[in-house]
Image: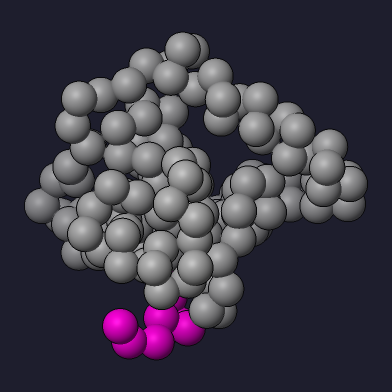
Amino acid sequence: MEDVGNLKIVLFDGVCNLCSSSVQWIIQHDPKAQFSFASLQSEMGEKLKTQFGILPDIDSVVLIENNTAFYQSDAALRIVKNTSGAWKFLYGFIVVPKFIRNFVYNFIAKNRYKWFGKKNECWLPNPELQSRFL
C-alpha cells in the first residue's frame, strides 16, 4: 500500500448510526475537504488496519494522520481540531487526562448501538461525496 502521509483518513464503523452521522457531520464542517473516509468493514478499511497495525477488534473511530493511527478521544479531538467554526475549540479538552477522556469516549462507544441503533449495511455516500471515500 502506498504512503498515506498527506491524507487525513477517518476509519469508522459503517453499520453504526452514530458513526455514519458523525461522518456526515465531519463532511459538513470540512469545507477544505481535508478528510477522506473508509468504513472499518470495507476492503480499504481492512487494508489500512493491516498497514497501520490496528487491532482487529477496534470497532470505533480511528484517525490516520501523518502516517500515524490515533484512537478514541485522541482521534475525535484531532478531527474536531481540523473542522470549521467554533467546534475546533473542543480540541482544548486535550488537556484533560487521557484516561478520563477515554473513559467518557469508551462509555459512549460501548452504548452507541443501544442509544443510536445499528444498520444492516454500511451507509453509502451520494455520488458527489463518493470521491472522499476510499
Q: Residue at x 46, y 82 (%)?
A: 6
Q: In the image as oriented, which residue stretches furthest toward the left?
A: 127
**3 in the magenta segment:** yes
Can you tell which quarter of the image residue 74 is in? bottom right
Magenta span: chief secondary structure:
loop
Residue at image position (39%, 68%) is 50
Residue 99 visible in image: yes
Left or right: where does residue 23 sit relative to residue 122? Answer: right
**Does 77 appear above or below 8?**
above
In front: 30, or 45? Answer: 45
Q: Residue at x 47, y 83 (%)?
A: 5
User: Is residue 29 in view from this perspective?
Assistant: no
Q: Residue furthest top?
A: 114
Color scheme of the displayed model: one colour
Please say whether residue 87 is one of the residues in the magenta stretch.
no
Q: Position of residue 118 (x, y in %)?
A: 32, 21
Quarter of the image with the C terminus in it: bottom left
Q: Position of residue 36 (x, y in %)?
A: 36, 63
- Residue 11: x and y in percent read 41, 54
Write the start and end of the magenta stretch as one range: 1-8
Q: Residue at x 73, y 40 (%)?
A: 102
- Percent position of residue 133, x then y: 25, 59
The image shows residue 57, relative to residue 48, as above or below, that is: above
